[in-house]
Every structure is written in structure tokens, then in C-alpha cells.
Image: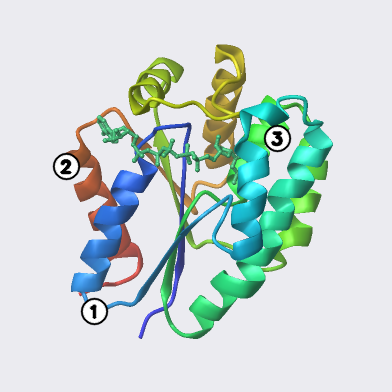
Amino acid sequence: MKSFFITFEGPEGSGKTTQINFLTEYLQEKGLEIFQTREPGGTLIGDKIRKILLDQENIEMDPVTEIFLYEAVRVEHVKKKIVPALKSNKVVISDRYYDSTLAYQGFARGLPPEQVETCNHFAVGDVHPQLTILLDVTTDVSAERVEKRGYIDRIESEGKSFHEKVRNGFLKIAENEPDRFIVIDGTKSIEDIREVIRKEVTRRFNID
Ligand code: T5A
């Protein structure tokens, strides 16, 4: 059995959930066992903290409080879900992981990137994804898709310049780690993106 760890990253509404569902289905058809998960969330405690993080009422949250809450979710997630899944030969696919912290709390919120990376490292130890798929969409496309959904959470309610910084932050992170990342134009059709992801995952992990 194969075990590997894939993360999906990107701005709000970039299509991560849509593509994760397709990839899960495809890999299951190939006989692989999948653990599909997301951040913030993925555990009992993580889901409770998620509510605090995304609640519009908590608009005054300090950025340092924010990063520690995201990292607290991650510690629970890594120790209780991701590591056990990898140990039992599952493919782990996570909707967001530590690159989101660097993009949102680092590049956009303005916390020093070295400190964000220290926090990320403290939370995950040596549990790193082998492949990260970045779905890149412009701030306008992202806002349009979120608006259609009909509700807006605390982070989504940040202004356009915040979301521009998130997008540029992701692109910079990907540029710095070209072996781990593939960057896909998230405004292409759902089917085209699905095919690119299938091909890349099949090639990288030698799936028959
Ligand atoms: N966050 C997270 C931090 O600040 N720091 C951190 O460390 C972490 C881990 C999480 C929030 O927390 C922040 C980032 C986020 O603000 P969330 O609710 O989990 O919040 O939000 P998202 O991860 O952004 O999830 P979304 O559900 O908003 O977006 P998805 O999953 O990327 O997009 P998806 O697949 O649901 O698609 C959105 C819509 O677009 C359509 C879909 O049909 C759907 O309607 N769509 C397309 N339309 C046209 N063309 C395509 N190619 C399309 N693909 C999808």
C-alpha cells in the first residue's frame, strides 16, 4: 500500500474542496485508502477552535492569538489524525496546512515570516506534505465565488488588499519550493484542473 501526504492551498473559493473530492474518488478507484481532511478542523478540539476562528463576532482577535489558535488546531490534527493515517498506509489529502498560515498570518496579517515558520515547525515537527497543489485565483474571482455561497466568515470579510497579499504570499511560497508545489490556474474549467491534478499525482506517486 502507498502512503503519501498531499495538501491543497489557495485563496478563498479557489476550488480546493471541489478538486479534493475528485482526487479522492480517483485514488479510491485505484485501490488506495484515503484520509480526507481540512484545516482549521479535522478533530473534535480543532472543530471547536474553527468556530472561534471564523466567527464574525471575533473580528477584534489579535494576530498572535490567531496564529496560536491555528497552530493549536494543527497540533491536534497532526498528532491525532494525520500521523496515524500515514502510519496505517493511507493517502492523506488536506484542504489547507501550514502554507496557509504563512500566507494569511505572515504575508497578509504581517507577522514576521521567520516567526510564523518557527510556529509551523513547532506544530508539525517533521510531518511535511510531499506535494502541494496551489489553486491560484484572482481576488475578484475569489470574492465572486464566496459571495455566491451566501455567507462570509471572519477571514473572508477582510478587505481586498488583505486577500491580494494572501494570493501573492502563496505564489511566493510556491516559487521558493518548486519541487513540492504545482501551481494551477484556478479559473480554468473544473474538468481541465481535475485532469492536470490526476496526471501530476499519477506521475509523482507512480500510480498504475
Ligand atoms: N486560514 C486557514 C488561516 O488564516 N490560517 C491557517 O493557518 C489556515 C489553515 C478557512 C479560513 O481560515 C484561513 C483561510 C480561510 O479564510 P474555510 O471555510 O475552510 O476557511 O475556507 P476555504 O478553505 O477558503 O474553503 P472554501 O470552501 O471557501 O473554498 P474552496 O474549497 O477552495 O472552494 P470550493 O471547491 O468550495 O469552490 C467554491 C465555489 O467555486 C466553484 C464551486 O462550484 C463552488 O461554488 N468552483 C468553480 N467555479 C468555476 N470554475 C472552477 N474551476 C471552479 N472550481 C470551483
Q: Position of residue 81 (x, y in %)?
A: 56, 72
Q: Disc 1 marks which residue?
A: 31
Pointer 3 local density, CA inside 10 Å: few below 14, some 14–19, many at least 20:
many
Foreground residue among 122 and 66: 66
Q: Classify residue 70 as left or right of residue 63.
A: left
In the structure shown, which secondary structural element does the residue marked by tag 2 occupy?
A: helix
* Viewport quadrant of the N terminus: bottom left
Residue 116 located left or right of residue 143: right
User: In the displayed structure, does residue 29 sit left or right of residue 186?
Assistant: left
Q: Which residue is mark 3?
A: 105
Residue 65 horizontal side relative to residue 96, left or right: right
Q: Secondary structure at mark 1?
A: loop
Q: How is the image coloured?
A: rainbow
> Mark 1: which amino acid?
Gly
Which amino acid lies under the numbered mark 3 shown in the image of this protein?
Gln
Give coordinates of residue 156: x percent, y percent: 54, 26
Please tell me whether residue 115 is drawn above or below residue 140 in the rendered image: below
Rendered-image quarter of ligand 1: top left
- What residue sits 35% from the left and 25% below the top? 145
- Which comes sooner in the sequence, label 2 or label 3? 3
CA distance for labels 2 and 3? 32 Å
Residue 26, image quadrant:
bottom left
Inspect this view and state whether residue 127 appears.
no
User: What residue do we see at 83% from left, 37% from top?
Assistant: 64
6 up-or-down from 19: above or below: below
Disc 3 within 8 angstroms of ligand 1 (CB): yes
* Residue drawn 79% across the image and 51% down it: 119
State the CA–CA distance, disc 1 to disc 3. 38 Å
Q: Which mark is residue 191?
A: 2
